[in-house]
Image (cartoon, rainbow, N blue to C red):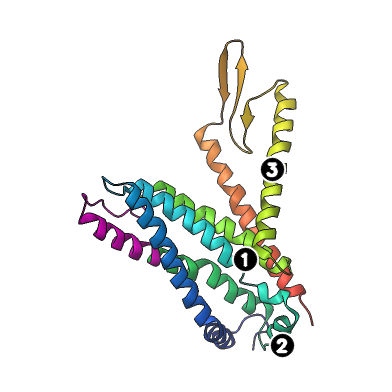
Amino acid sequence: MSQLFNISRFGRLFRKHTTEHGGAYLLATGVLLGGLGLVLGFVAYLATPGPLMPDMQAVIFTMGLLAAGAFFTSTVFALFGDNRQATAALLLPASHWEKYLVGWLYALPIFLAVYVGCFYLVDALVQQVKGTFDAPAPLVRLFSNQLMCFSLVIYAVVNAVFLWGSIFFRKQHFVRTAFGFLIAAMVVAQLNMQVVQRLVGRDISGVLPFGGMSFREGQEWQSVNLEPTQNSWFVLVPLGLMLLAWAAAYRRVTEKQL
C-alpha cells in the first residue's frame, strides 16, 4: 500500500470528513442561499423600474464568490490550530497528502460547484419574481461573461492564499490572512512605484505591478504600456503565486506533529 496516496484509504477519509462536517456544510449552504437572496433581491428592488441586467448579476457573482470563498477556505484547516482537534486529525490512518487533498477538494472544486449552483438558483428565482413586475432580463452566462471567467481565475489565487492562511495561523484565520494579504499588496505596490520612478527618472501618477504607467510631459499626459502579446505573459504571475501558496500550505500540513 502506497504511503503517499491510496484510493480506498482516501475514499474512507473523504467519507469520514463528509459525515462529520456535512451538517455544518449544509448549514453554510443555507446561509449562502439566504445571503445571495438578500443581495440579489435588494439590488433587483433598487433596479426598479427595469430588469436586473447580466452585467450587474456578474458583479454580484464575483463579489459573493471572492468573499464567501475566502471565508470558507480559511476554515478548511482550522482544526489543526486546536490542540484537541489537531490530535484527532493527526492520528487518522492517512497520509498528509490525503488529508490535504480532502481540504483542497472541498475548498476549490466542490465549493465552486455549490456556489455556482446556489447563485443560479437564487438568480433564476429573483428574475422570475421580478419578471412579474418588470421586463425580465436573461440570466448571465458563466463562460460567456468576461468578468465571471476572470473571477474564477482570481478565486483560484485567493483560494491558495487563504488555504495557506488556514494552516499557518492558529486562530482568526480569515482576519489574519486578509490583513496580511492587504499589507503585502500595499508594500509591493509601494516598492513597485519607487522602482519605476527611479527607472524613468520622473514622478508618475500611479502604476500597478506588471501594469502600464502614466506621466506628464509638458502639458500632456503620456502612457507607456507593453504590447498585448507581452502582457499575456503576466498571467503566469498569479499562476505561480497560486502554485506556491498551495505548495506552502501542503508543506505546513506535513510539519504538523503531535
The residue sitting at 54% across, 72% down in the picture is: 105
x and y, in percent, of residue 189 in the image: 68, 39
Give the amino acid type for the residue marked by disc 2 in the picture.
Leu
Q: Secondary structure at mark 3?
A: helix
Q: Which residue is mark 2?
A: 91
Between disc 2 and disc 3, whose residue precedes?
A: 2
The residue sitting at 71% across, 48% down in the picture is: 183
Q: Which residue is mark 1?
A: 74
Q: Which residue is mark 3?
A: 186
Camera-nearest label, 2 or 3: 3
Camera-nearest label, 1 or 2: 1
Between disc 1 and disc 3, whose residue precedes?
A: 1
In the rendered view, tell whether residue 222 sits above or below residue 244: above
- Circle 2 crowding by C-alpha within 10 Å: few under 14, some 14–19, many from 20: few
Segment tinted magenta in the rendering: 118-143
Please tell me in which quadrant of the rendered image residue 161 appears: bottom right
